[in-house]
Image (spheres, rainbow, N blue to C red):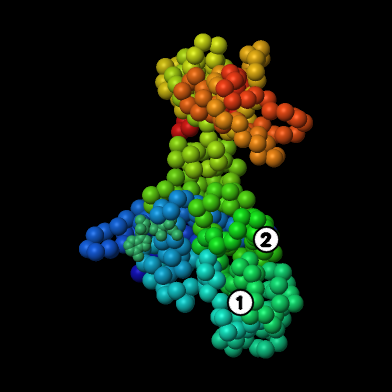
Amino acid sequence: MTTSPPHHATSVQPGAGQRAAHPAIEFAGVRKDYLSHGESVPAVKSLDLAIGQGEFFSLLGPSGCGKTTTMRMIAGFEEPTEGRVFLDGKDVTDVTPNKRDVNMVFQSYALFPHLNVLQNVAFGLERKRVAKNEIKQRVGQMLEIVSLTGMEKRQPREMSGGQQQRVALARALVNHPRALLLDEPLGALDLKLRQQMQVELKRIQREVGITFVYVTHDQGEALTMSDRIAVMNAGMIEQLGSPREIYEKPATRFVAGFIGTSNLVDGQVTRVDGGVAVLEPAPQERVLVPVGGHVETGRNLEVLVRPEKIDLHRTIPRDAGTSVLSGVVTEVVYHGTSTNYTVATSAGSDFVVFDQNANDAEDVASRGERVYLTWAPQHSYPIGV
Ligand code: ADP
Ligand code: MG
């Protein structure tokens, strides 16, 4: 069966310098249930998604939310229970993996241990009987892109984990697939190397211009590299957007909790003044939330404030134009670039404040001290409004 792809024109963002008639990858009404011991396990509940040509797209979510299943349906290793999958506008739902022009990279590099770097990378091209000269040229170019020039003769066991991952990348990219699927590829590397590889991966993707679909449960990783991120939870996409949108404007409480550190305060709107809703958790306290015309007095609001937007004071601040909460410092942790304070607010919730160590030679406050937290109105974000 072949159906024509749905149109998601507004949600497609082709990568720089590319404009194509069709998205690289599309899901239309896709559901996937596994059958396990006679029981149906829902892995992906409902997926409608279009990934643009040349996009660096991440699927981000906790373990078990359906990321790998989604990837495997792109590659053709799993068949949807319902719905269709399209590559470049072509319905590939019934097409076998080897006929789909996509490659996958995993955490385990799966290199051929008895072949050297050159042979590992050239393997696919040789099987396709590409001319020797062309193989040499393409492999050389790819090793340069992944910064492995000079290591052609090494065997995988003579290389570090990061270097082996580069070989795996070169091997996956050398035959110019339409899309590269990466399933938690950096999971085995230590933090420093992982961060270095994140920057490298982004550069490599820019240089080759191929659509990357990147699966991770690490929000920092997704924020660093992606053009867009789909945040998944229990088989569904909770939010789809740029890293900035997802961090600054989480659509749901789940996204707010999963991405970054979130301070949440909720309460009844006591008044709305010029498009700004006001919560008054306690005397002399207020939370100012720009809401436009959407919110009425008396309703409940849940408000997000990020830790780096908050200022900490030891005396009650005079500026009436900011939000103010008071509380008691319960934790002070020095992190080098910043000091992080945990404050038990009288509004009920714990707040975390990141204080940049730009000029301060000393901590603003110590444990047990009463403090006042302030932030500008535009840094209050109402969730789900
Ligand atoms: P993620 O990659 O986000 O951790 P998966 O896609 O691997 O999530 O799994 C999604 C859900 O499907 C989980 O509940 C998982 O236990 C289940 N699942 C995955 N693979 C199978 C399988 N082959 N058989 C049965 N259930 C599976
Ligand atoms: Mg997985």
Q: Which labelled disc corresponds to residue 174? A: none
Mark closest to the chain's N terminus, 2 or 1: 1
Q: Amino acid at mark 2?
A: Glu
Ligand 2 is in which quadrant of the figure? bottom left
Query: In front: 234, or 88?
Result: 234
Query: In front: 222, or 273?
Result: 222
Crowdedness of circle 1 by 10 Å Cα count: few (<14), some, many (20+)? few
Residue 278 in the image: state x and y as whole percent.
Answer: 52, 17
Residue 146 in the image: state x and y as whole percent.
Answer: 68, 69
Q: Is residue 355 above or below residue 121?
A: above
**Circle 2 residue:** 200
Crowdedness of circle 2 by 10 Å Cα count: few (<14), some, many (20+)? some
Q: Is residue 287 above or below residue 239?
A: above
Could you tell me which residue is drawn at 53 percent across and 65 percent down? 107
Residue 156 in the image: state x and y as whole percent.
Answer: 61, 77
**Circle 1 residue:** 157
Disc 2 vs disc 1: which is toward the camera?
1
Q: Amino acid at mark 1?
A: Arg
Residue 161 in the image: state x and y as whole percent.
Answer: 61, 68
Q: Which residue reaches farthest left? A: 38
